[in-house]
Image (cartoon, helix red, strand yellow):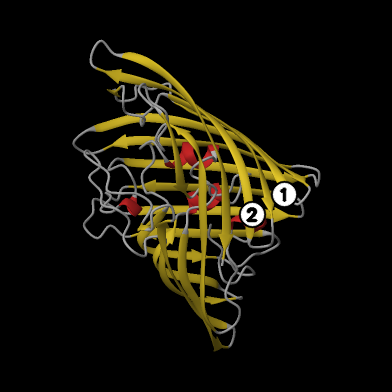
Amino acid sequence: MFKQTNPTILATAALLACSAAAQAQPAVGNGVQLYGLVDNVAGRFTGAIGGVNAQSQTVSKVEGGGMSTSHWGLRGNEDLGGGLTASFELSAFFRSDTGAGGRSDALPAPVNVAADPFFSRASWVGLSSPTWGRLRMGTIISQLFLNTINSNAFGDSMTFGPLPLLTFTGGVLGGGTSWTNSLVYDTPVYAGVSATLARSLSEAQGGGNVGARIGYANGPLATSLVWQNVKKDPQTFADGTTANDTSAWQLAASYDFDAVKLFAHVGHIQNKGTNIAPQNVGYRIWDLSASVPVGAGRVLAGYAVRKTSDTAAPAPATVAGGNVERKILSLGYDHNLSKRTDVYAMWMHDSTQTRTLPAPLRVIEASGNSYGIGIRHRF
């Protein structure tokens, strides 16, 4: 979904090879580049993005963003001499099935966040050097999201990808996929090791966010560890889908055996609630996925589980988020027609267990299948 301008100095370089299929081409040298991606999928889908619930119905539809969220943007570089480079990126989401902006309409209470601001995918300016690394300011992808999409077989798919769905949907995690008002420093890559430090300033929004990531890549092996602590209350959809304070960590590893590339993750999300309504609910996440080259494409498979042994807050049976357990199994094939265009066919089985209201409290199980065929084109 995201690819940066100069891979030799980026903290994300250790993982970029894992997500090349989901990324646009970088600007080369001085100048400005228009870039983007359009992705639509047609099929039958069960459940909302947060998971199936007790009354989910299967709906036939054309949906934007089957394998990647549609977006467009501008980015560019200027060589300032002496190895110093200035760069920027402005990028916006859009719903390619309807033409509307953003990823979603406003979310209702208790979240009460508006739809995506125009350049909520990315809006930053920075300076970089091969010697000391890169410093950026603005709205910047979170390190947890970057780590997730660059180290699983389904990339940044928020429709069929087990790991992105279980980590970033359902109202469990705070902070969203990009952080506003951020300062981010990326080290150069030394002997395959890179690191990033990120800070999102509060600006009277409840508290600041802080995150860090370290990664290593050498030949077919890549590993990474990321941690974040989120206290900033969401003012927009891009800031996150919960007002709760949360912390999270994720350990990822992949190995390319040529005949198959394997990915694995373990992680944890701690939901601390708010000062007025504190919580202490921990969610464990693990994921296994694989990419098998077949012809001009790849067979993709993934399975992920998110569960808690703590007391998750009960919710109406029609609400998908806040599950005590959610499991996703996805299978599919992604076929490359060219370097910029691919077609895909995907199937996903989603199952949840949710502690529901009204009293007496009970756990409701629900499951459903979604499948679709889609086209993705980069420009």
Compare residues 6 and 97 and report the one nearer the observer. 97
Compare residues 199 and 59 and report the one nearer the observer. 59
Q: Is residue 300 left or right of residue 260?
A: left
Residue at coordinates 31% horizontally, 42% vertically from top-left? 242
State if disc 2 and disc 1 touch (CB < 8 Å): yes
Examine the rendering and report whether any part of residue 11 can be seen: no
* Residue matched to label 1: 297
Q: Position of residue 329 (x, y in %)?
A: 58, 30
Element on which disc 2 rests = strand
Examine the rendering and report whether any part of residue 71 can be seen: yes
* Residue matched to label 2: 342
Q: Earlier in the sequence, mark 1 or mark 2?
A: 1
Q: Position of residue 145 (x, y in %)?
A: 49, 50
Element on which disc 1 rests = strand
| Image quadrant where residue 276 sits | top left
Kindly identify the amino acid type of the residue bearing the numbered disc 2. Asp
Distance from disc 1 to disc 2, alpha carbons, whole Å, reads 9 Å
Q: Relative to residue 64, is residue 262 depicted above or below? A: above
Q: Relative to residue 53, is residue 373 depicted above or below? A: below
Callout 2 crowding tier (Cα within 10 Å): few <14, some 14–19, many ≥20: some
Compare residues 5 and 346 and report the one nearer the observer. 346
Q: Quadrant of the C terminus?
A: bottom right
Q: Is residue 24 left or right of residue 333?
A: left
Kindly identify the amino acid type of the residue bearing the numbered disc 1. Gly
Residue at coordinates 42% horizontally, 28% vertically from top-left? 52
